[in-house]
């Protein structure tokens, strides 16, 4: 099993920046890709960005050029640096992990094996 715990969410004004983190523990060696998803009120959860252990990334079009994913494999921490935030970025942000052997480029939430509890990001206009 792998445990994921997000942190760093909060309230920020439009145009501002925020960095959220996800600390992984347990059998982390069993996972390859890690990702961020988000869910806004009244909407379905959507893919934001993923990164493999080797550092290959895959961004949703809506965040390209504004968000940057990174990971510290030694510390088992995943980061999401969010710049130029917009009110429509307001959501609960979830960290997810994918076991080795899965499609590391998948954006389908149903294919991810482990999930964190989420952290709220609110962008005011």
Image (cartoon, rainbow, N blue to C red):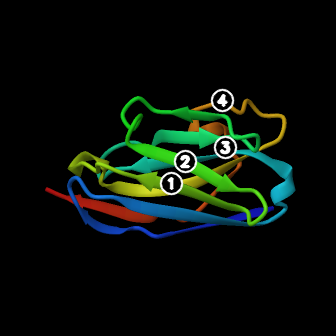
Residue at label 1?
80
Please tell me which of labels 2 and 4 falls first in the chain.
2
Distance between the Cα atoms at labels 3 and 2? 17 Å
Residue at horizontal 59%, vertical 40%?
Answer: 50
The quadrant holding residue 25 is bottom right
Across and down, in percent, residue 111 comes to: 67, 37
Q: Is mark 2 on a helix, strand or loop?
A: strand
Which residue is farthest left?
125
Q: Which-is-in-front pick, marks 1 and 3? A: 1
Q: Which-is-in-front pick, marks 4 and 3? A: 4
Distance between the Cα atoms at labels 1 and 4? 17 Å
Residue 34 located left or right of residue 17: right
Please tell me which of labels 1 and 3 falls first in the chain.
1
Q: Which mark is residue 105?
A: 4
Please tell me which of labels 3 and 2 falls first in the chain.
2
Residues at discs 4 and 3 in contact (Cβ within 8 Å):
no
Is residue 118 among what the camera can see?
A: no
Please tell me which of labels 4 and 3 falls first in the chain.
4
Residue 83 located left or right of residue 71: left
Is residue 104 among what the camera can see?
A: yes
Q: Which mark is residue 69?
A: 2
The local crowd at label 3, few if under 14, some if 14 to 19, many if 20 or more residues have their Cα within 10 Å, is: many
Distance between the Cα atoms at labels 1 and 3? 18 Å
109 relative to 14, above or below? above
Residues at discs 2 and 1 in contact (Cβ within 8 Å):
yes
Across and down, in percent, residue 84 comes to: 29, 48
Q: What element carries label 1?
A: strand
The local crowd at label 2, few if under 14, some if 14 to 19, many if 20 or more residues have their Cα within 10 Å, is: many
Residue at label 3?
112
């Amino acid at each position: 099993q792998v445990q994921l715990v997000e942190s760093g969410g909060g309230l920020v004004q439009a145009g501002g920046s925020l960095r959220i983190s996800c600390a992984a523990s347990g059998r982390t060696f069993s996972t390859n890709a890690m990702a961020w998803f988000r869910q806004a009120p009244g909407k379905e959860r959507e893919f934001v960005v993923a990164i493999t252990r080797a550092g290959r990334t895959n961004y949703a079009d809506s965040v390209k050029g504004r968000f940057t994913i990174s990971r510290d494999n030694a510390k088992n921490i995943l980061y999401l640096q969010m710049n130029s935030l917009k009110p429509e970025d307001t959501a609960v942000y979830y960290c997810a992990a994918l076991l080795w052997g899965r499609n590391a480029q998948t954006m389908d939430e149903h294919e991810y094996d482990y999930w964190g509890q989420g952290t709220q990001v609110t962008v005011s206009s």
